[in-house]
Image (cartoon, rainbow, N blue to C red):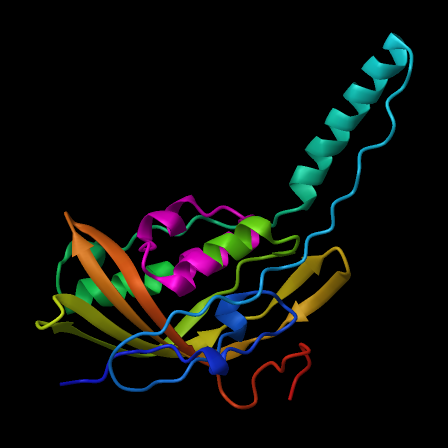
Amino acid sequence: MKPRFVWRPAAWRYAALGLSILFVLPVLVGCGSTDSSPPSPTLTVVPPESLQTSDAANKESVETNNDADSTTAVKEAGEAEKPVPPAAMENVDADGAIAAAEYYLLLTLYGATTLETEDLEKMSGAECAWCQEEIRRLKGWTGYLETMPEFEIYERQGWYDAEQNDFVVALAGKRGSSQLNSPEGTSEARAQEFKVGMILENHSDQWVVTDIYMELPEDGISEDGAEQ
């Protein structure tokens, strides 16, 4: 029987970029699973300015703030073409699972660029701790990628696990670089090689990710965000 993917809490490692697809370093061991919840991001709450006393001033203030909010909304997210589900996802077999896994990875980067998580949430199982943490992080993230990086997959493997009635997918490849914008300024999200393992189930022709394992090379991003 082929090995499955398991989390080891002590192996979590974070980079300053704030993207779990860039910083998670779990350990591949035997069977079973251990849940791990990374620390919550720190959010700074800025109190609103004092209200004007006159009605005219109040109206002017509201109109000005609305314009500012509209401008901010545009600046707080990058633009990207929404990933399209590949036709192979219609197959309930190993090839379909591989296509779904690659599509899911694209959705994580689409979310990191546009801050939209609707499709990512549809494919994320409630039992997938990594998935739920990624969604929570993106919803509360104050930064974004200027442009959506590309994935280049070198190796693909997928198989059906009859005992667990699910599919196991292993991918190896490289994520392209992009510019990271945050309240602290801009920095480069440099290219990064990765290995990913996913457990997927198919319910009524809908693929759902139930667990994820991710591994980065030793020369990846360090905990302070610097190159090693």
* Percent position of residue 153, x then y: 37, 75
Name the quadrant of the C terminus.
bottom right
Q: Quadrant of residue 213?
A: bottom left
Q: Residue at x 58, y 74 (%)?
A: 14
Q: Position of residue 77 (x, y in %)?
A: 62, 47
Residue visible at 60% across and 50% down in the picture: 78
Region in magenta: 106-133
What x and y, as percent, mark residue 202? 18, 56
Identify the residue shown where x is 35% and y is 85%: 28
Q: Is residue 117 in the magenta section?
A: yes
Let me know if residue 59 is in the magenta part.
no
Report the magenta stretch's main SS: helix
The image quarter in which residue 66 lies: top right
Q: Is residue 207 left or right of residue 43?
A: left
Quadrant of the rendered image containing residue 34: bottom left
48 sits left or right of 179 in the view: right
Eyeballing the image, is 131 above or below 26?
Answer: above
Name the residue located 71 percent from the left edge and 67 percent from the top edge. Answer: 187
Residue 196 vertical position relative to residue 49 in the rendered view, above or below: below
Q: Quadrant of the N terminus?
A: bottom left
Q: Tag count in the figure?
A: 0
Residue 16 percent location from the top left of the image:
66, 71
- As drawn, the residue found furthest toward the left would be 162
Extreme residue toward the top, this view = 55
Front one among 196 and 39: 39
Of 69 and 71, the residue lying toward us: 69
Foreground residue among 119 and 165: 165
